[in-house]
Amino acid sequence: MSDTQPNIGEMLLATVPMAKTLNLEVIEATEERAVLRLPDQPDFHNHVGGPHAGAMFTLGESASGAIVIGAFADQLGRAVPLAVKAEIGYRKLAMGPVTATATLGRTKAEVVAELDAGERPEFPVHIAITREDGAVTGEMTIVWTLRPQG
């Protein structure tokens, strides 16, 4: 678990200034799952009083980045994680604070094996964005790659 790794949440907030700008809260960040929360903040509301779509996208993308850091922290000396593409679907009206939960779509072992073989692996990260009542307001998939350094 995260006891033997650097603090994933601190790494994310230190390397992604936008996450700090939105005051994102890291609830959980491990190799298996990342959960981030966007507090209800009027400065980031849309025209109906809920979180702006751009803020929710950033929340989801940040959660995906946290799990990538968590899962591949031991590979960061030889590869740079980069988002390749993203898709988001807004399912229900989001009001109040929202939470993004990210999980890997492939196993770490598969991705590292491709990196070891000299390839540039791609892997999806799936994110569910929920309201406080548990309703899913958005779903995202972000495809990441580990670009070998050097």
Image (tube, helix red, strand yellow):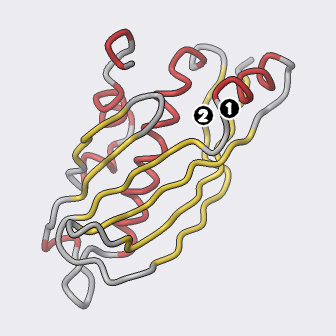
Q: Relative to 103, is 31 above or below?
A: above
- Residue 101, how many percent across, how many down? 39, 51
- Residue 51, how many percent across, how many down? 26, 74
Looking at the image, which residue sits at the far top?
4
Q: Relative to 64, is 89 above or below?
A: below
Q: Secondary structure at mark 1?
A: strand
Labels 1 & 2 near each other (Cβ < 8 A): yes
Q: CA distance from mark 1 to mark 2?
A: 5 Å
**Which residue is label 1 attached to?**
146
Quadrant containing the N terminus is top left
* Residue 113 lies in quadrant: top right
Quadrant containing the C terminus is top right
Q: Secondary structure at mark 2?
A: strand
Looking at the image, which residue sits at the far bottom?
48
* Residue 22 lies in quadrant: bottom left
Q: Nearer the viewer, residue 12 or 100?
A: 100
Q: Amino acid at mark 1?
A: Leu
**Residue 45 appears left or right of 19:** left
**Which residue is label 2 attached to?**
81
Name the residue located 30 percent from the left edge and 37 percent from the top edge.
Answer: 28
Label 2 crowd (10 A; few <14 / some 14-19 / many >=20) = some
**Which label is found at residue 31?**
none
